[in-house]
Image: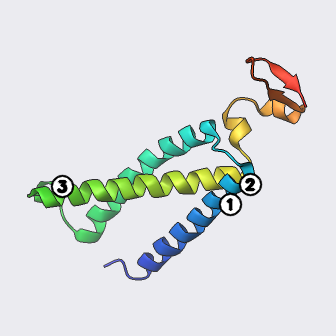
């Protein structure tokens, strides 16, 4: 049903996962602001996964009959959510956008980092 799109999706998942692992190993921690933005993008990815399921199967929401149909729809949404979250986190990490998303872009450009007490300390 998906044809060549299946291999494109698999290749994208492999690249996103490797980039995600590389970002985590490089930074040694999870950037929470980047993760929050990635999770918000993941919601859109889950909805897009459901939309592509609907397009590929030529079915309607009313065609979801039994519990297994609903479980499959939830699994497709969760797969889209997780895949998009990992992919967006990896892209933002590779591009180094965490500080901009956290609202500390100007401080980071000036060589200032957040301190433990909540203020800013020079590097």
Distance (Cα) linking label 3 and label 1:
35 Å
Q: Residue furthest bottom?
A: 3
Dot 3, how many residues are within 10 Å of its Cα: few (below 14), some (14-19), or many (20+)? Answer: few
Q: Are marks 3 and 2 in contact (CB under 8 Å)?
A: no
Q: Earlier in the sequence, mark 3 or mark 1?
A: 1
Secondary structure found at label 2:
helix
Instruction: Tell me if residue 50 can be seen.
Output: no
Q: Is residue 83 left or right of residue 35?
A: left
Distance (Cα) linking label 3 and label 2:
39 Å
Quadrant housing residue 23: bottom right
Dot 1, how many residues are within 10 Å of its Cα: few (below 14), some (14-19), or many (20+)? Answer: some
* Image location (x, y in percent) of residue 43: 42, 45
Determine the residue positioned at 40% across, 57% down: 80
Determine the residue positioned at 68% across, 60% down: 22
Q: Earlier in the sequence, mark 3 or mark 2?
A: 2
Secondary structure found at label 3:
helix
Q: Looking at the picture, does residue 121 appear above or below residue 35?
A: above
Residue that label 3 marks: 70
* Image location (x, y in percent) of residue 46: 38, 52
Residue that label 2 marks: 26
Q: Are marks 1 and 2 in contact (CB under 8 Å)?
A: yes
- Residue in the foreground of this view, choosing between 86 and 7: 86
Distance (Cα) linking label 1 and label 2:
6 Å
Secondary structure found at label 1:
helix
Q: Looking at the picture, does residue 115 appear above or below residue 37?
A: above
- Mark 3 against mark 2, which lies toward the viewer? 2
- Residue in the foreground of this view, choosing between 19 and 54: 19
Residue that label 1 marks: 22
Q: Looking at the picture, does residue 103 appear above or below residue 9?
A: above
């Amino acid at each position: 049903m998906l044809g060549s799109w299946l291999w494109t999706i698999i290749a994208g998942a492999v690249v996103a996962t490797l980039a995600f692992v590389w970002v985590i190993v490089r930074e040694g921690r999870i950037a929470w602001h980047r993760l929050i933005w990635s999770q918000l993008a993941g919601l859109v990815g889950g909805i897009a996964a459901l939309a592509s399921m609907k397009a590929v199967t030529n079915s309607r929401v009313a065609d979801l009959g039994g519990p297994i149909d609903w479980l499959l729809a939830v699994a497709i949404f969760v797969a889209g959510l997780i895949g998009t979250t990992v992919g967006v986190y990896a892209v933002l990490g590779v591009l180094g956008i965490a500080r901009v998303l956290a609202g500390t872009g100007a401080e980071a450009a000036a060589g200032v980092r957040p301190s433990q007490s909540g203020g800013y300390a020079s590097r």
